[in-house]
Image (cartoon, rainbow, N blue to C red):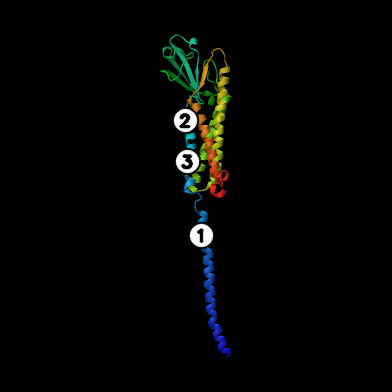
Amino acid sequence: MWSTFIVQDEENRPTATAGGGAGALAGMMGVRSGGGKRRTRASSPALSESQEGKIKLAFFVATIGITLTVLGVGTEFWVELSPPKTNTNNETCLAAHYGLWKSCSKTLWVTDVDPERASCGPLDLPGESNCTYFKFYTTGENTVLFQKTPAKNLTVTSAMFAIFSLFLMLMGSICIIMAISKGVLFFLKPASVCFTLSGILVFLSLIFFHQSVLSFLASDHSIPLHYELSWSVTCLGCAGALLVVAGALFLLLALPYSPWEKCLPSRNNEI
């Protein structure tokens, strides 16, 4: 009887061992497959099509601001200067304009100027133009226009703010490209900071430039001048506003919830 029981017990052991081994193997495969699923979910992009479209739209707004900034900084039509026609001879009069980097003077014919206009101009009239770069960036020499000298320190400060703003625009654009290519919302926050600060620096550049113009006019009172901020300043003003708006949009897109749903809940939730 004992021999029969021992034989049956030995026959059942391999079966149990095989069943336990299959269960352990299945458990291990299940754990591994579950881990593989977790890795796949973690590596999947976090941006949906709607989010990516909103980011591209906000980046388009920022791109317009960047383009206007480059256009305004690279041109010299920041301020137009025109003396009274009475201070010139009967045939020609001299007008000028300058920006951050160079100044230009233009000789106009008095007959082309509007008779009702008291000063020489505008600059879009035909005439001979002569442009020179500011030497205080290289040799430290100042430029003389109508016996007046532009404020060197204020002009250099305005140019530095403009250059720093362009650098921040470049960094913000890199962050947006990384956010779209990698599908990570984290890059929207530094992009928002970069674009917002660049817009603020653009406005500071305009403020310091306007102060430099006022200092330029006050440097000598022998020749009265009429000044008018030109289209380059308009480009920079629009650019600063667009960059601040783009920074605010990127900040809203970086939030983990929708501010519209938070402030304006749907009617279904209220019911």
Q: To which residue does mark 3 refer?
A: 57
Q: Can residue 156 be seen in this view?
A: no
User: Would you place residue 164 above or below residue 19 in this image?
Assistant: above
The circle drawn on residue 37 is 1
Kindly report the distance in space between the C-alpha atoms of the residues bearing marks 3 and 1: 33 Å
Looking at numbered disc 2 in the image, what kind of residue is underneath it? Leu
Q: Which of marks 3 and 1 is in front?
A: 3
Q: Which of marks 3 and 2 is in front?
A: 3
Q: Where residue 14 sits in the image (x, y, percent)?
A: 53, 79
Q: Which residue is drawn at 53% across and 71% down?
A: 23
Q: In which quarter of the image is residue 156?
A: top right
Q: Is residue 179 visible?
A: yes
Q: To which residue does mark 2 refer?
A: 71
Which is more toward the observer, 222 or 15?
Answer: 15
Kindly report the distance in space between the C-alpha atoms of the residues bearing marks 3 and 2: 21 Å
Q: Where residue 77 sits in the image (x, y, percent)?
A: 48, 24
